[in-house]
Amino acid sequence: MARHQVTATVNGDAVEFLCETGETLLEVLRDELNLTGTKEGCGTGDCGACSVTVDGRLVCSCLVLGVEAEGRSIETIEGMAVGADLHVLQRKFLEHDALQCGICMSGILIASRSLLERNPDPTESEVRFWLAGNLCRCTGYHKIVEAVLDAAREMRGA
């Protein structure tokens, strides 16, 4: 199979990698760039575990080809914290005990950040609607929704 050289920005850093034509962005992130925080849940875009942003747009990385990353800016869970300083969403998820096994968490956190970047003051219904593409088999969503709303309040300074 043909291998393609791709240049992109991942979590603010310029990267280059080789990938095969049919290799997904999820595979590239995990296998070529060793960014294993993004998880594969279903491989069909139904669960949201592999959510990342590409040029600010929330996508399932299992549905995007690695070659499509050429010239793009990609943000993964590894880019949320700055050193030891957790992103406010990460802190609030811990404070609200809004996590379980961890398979879905990176996708939910990325989706939550994407929501708050677009809507800094969401209602509970808006949070639930936005996160509907992220499935968690371990728990209900109440604590997750509360953590997102609490993070939104803190980010707004409310």
Image: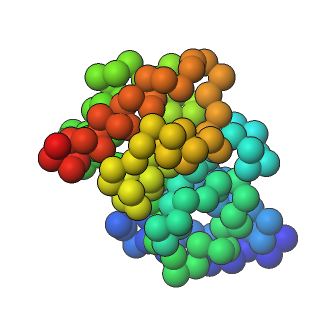
Give the residue at x 35% y 66%: 12
Q: Residue 32: tell me if it is visible.
A: no
Residue 75 lies left or right of residue 13; in this view the side is: right
Residue 126 lies left or right of residue 82; in this view the side is: right
Give the residue at x 52% y 81%: 71
Colour scheme in use: rainbow
| Residue 115 vertical position relative to residue 84 in the rendered view, above or below | below
Give the residue at x 15% y 47%: 157
| Residue 42 vertical position relative to residue 79 in the rendered view, above or below | above
- The picture places residue 114, in percent across and down from the top left corner, at 44, 55
Q: Residue 70: tell me if it is visible.
A: yes
Question: Which image quarter is the N terminus in?
Answer: bottom right
- The picture places residue 148, in percent across and down from the top left corner, at 38, 37
Q: Nearer the viewer, residue 145 or 1?
A: 145
| Residue 111 vertical position relative to residue 11 in the rendered view, above or below | above
| Image-quadrant location for residue 137 | top right
Outermost residue to the left: 157
